[in-house]
Image: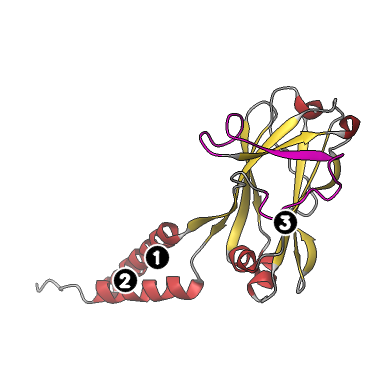
Amino acid sequence: MKLQRTGISIIASTVVGAALLVQGAFAQTVTLESWEGTMDGWTVPQGAGYFTPTFSSATGVTDGTYSLALTEANGGAGENYGQMLLSPFESAWTAALGNATSLSLDIYTPPGSFGYYLQFDVDVNNADIGYQSIDGYSYPATSIGSEYTLTIPIPAGIAAGLAASSNPTQIAIQVGGGYTSPGDTMNLDNLRVFEVPEPSTIAMLGFGLLGLVCLRPRRVS
């Protein structure tokens, strides 16, 4: 009996380990927006007096491709914790966010910009779950003077609500920070989510691995 239990334990450990490797291998990053020289329907809700959008391929996040350059206007009052960017409603984003564990955004701000601190908030708007902040309005901060990847975990409740929805989803990016003179610019690029396989897919792969382990030739003593 002891040998039998040990064998089952080894098989179970093998299957669990293999399933975790499969999950990691099948997980993928999905880019929602990279602003390659176009706004793609995104808007600056408070108008050009808040942030002025342009595009940059020479300065910013990803060398060799465009990033969205947002230049502060209106006497340095742009970073007032209001909506800086508002996306169109997209059905594809509902599915992507509903199957995701986190959302990331690449950001570059030159040294000394925005009073030396800049905070972001990312919200989703969907008819089934309403308007919700995925970071709980905690306003995580980016770094000033270098490129930074802001990564925000997507709460399970929000992901589940979007996974069950058939309505399109809008993304809103809010920003706040210290007082500074007008003209400071931030560059944004590569808004993306990290997706994981469906649990049913992992389970099926796990059972397949279990079958392979159980069918392996047994040594006759």
Q: Quadrant of residue 86?
A: bottom right
Report if residue 205 lies within the magenta region: no
Q: Quadrant of residue 107?
A: top right
> Do callouts 1 and 3 mark residues in contact (Cβ within 8 Å)?
no
Q: Nearer the viewer, residue 3 or 213?
A: 213
Main secondary structure found in the magenta portion: loop
> Do callouts 2 and 3 mark residues in contact (Cβ within 8 Å)?
no
> Do callouts 2 and 1 mark residues in contact (Cβ within 8 Å)?
yes
| Part of the protein shown in magenta | 39-65
Report, in whole angstroms, how far the alpha carbon at label 2 lies from the one at label 3. Answer: 42 Å
Q: Secondary structure at mark 2?
A: helix
Is 65 situated left or right of 159 in this image? left
Q: Which mark is residue 73?
A: none
x and y, in percent, of residue 64 in the image: 51, 35
Is 128 situated left or right of 149 in this image? right
Residue indicated by mark 2: 209
Describe the colour scheme in one phrase: secondary structure
Q: Nearer the viewer, residue 75 or 211?
A: 75
Q: Which amino acid lies under the numbered mark 3 shown in the image of this protein?
A: Ser
Report, in whole angstroms, how far the alpha carbon at label 2 lies from the one at label 1. Answer: 8 Å
Residue indicated by mark 3: 87
**Discs 2/3, front:** 3
